[in-house]
Amino acid sequence: MRFMKKLLFTFLWVLCFLTVLVVGDQFLLRFPADNIVLLSDFQHFYRDFRQRLAHTLPAGRHKGTLTPALPVAQRAADKRAVVDQARLVAQQTRRQAADDEPHYIYLDGNKAICFASTLDEIPASLRHSAKKLDN
């Protein structure tokens, strides 16, 4: 009889714990918390975490291994695309940096340091104080 009481007591606590988990899960998924800063950030994190967790769980019984979210070929293609895109952005950044580099430095009327790419960008009254930058 004492064993049955302990078993029933344990079962009720497990049931209460699972109920609290389900209620918390549904609260974090459905409660509109747009105006509550901390809660809306936590909800965003929780939804993202829950979605990522769902993608890493095995789709079927696979001897203890997890099924990847994307097939290997798709992940390799995505990596190549990301690398190609990163190279393109790096090239564009280098070109912009070379084009946008200031070639002159001068002080304006308020004694603030200013930069210019050409002498034409510097006001005529301040061109005498402009110094060419070495690249």
Image: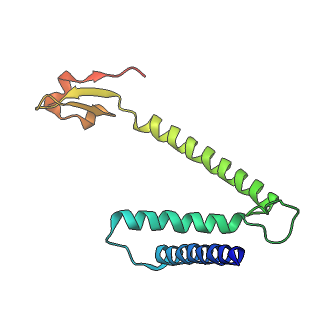
Q: Number of numbered discs present? A: 0
Q: Is residue 32 left or right of residue 74?
A: left
- For the point 83% across and 72% down, the residue is 60
- For the point 60% across and 78% down, the residue is 12
Residue 97 percent location from the top left of the image: 45, 37
Camera-side residue: 103 or 27?
A: 27
Residue 45 percent location from the top left of the image: 50, 62
Q: Is residue 18 left or right of residue 39?
A: right
Q: Is residue 60 left or right of residue 90?
A: right
Camera-side residue: 33 or 23?
A: 23
Q: Is residue 89 left or right of residue 72?
A: left
> Looking at the rendering, in which quadrant would you find the N terminus?
bottom right
- For the point 79% across and 61% down, the residue is 66
Camera-side residue: 28 or 13?
A: 13
> Looking at the rendering, in which quadrant would you find the C terminus?
top left
Residue 65 percent location from the top left of the image: 83, 59
Residue 2 lies in quadrant: bottom right
Residue 74 lies in quadrant: bottom right
Q: Is residue 98 above or below residue 130?
A: below
Residue 116 lies in quadrant: top left
Residue 51 percent location from the top left of the image: 61, 68
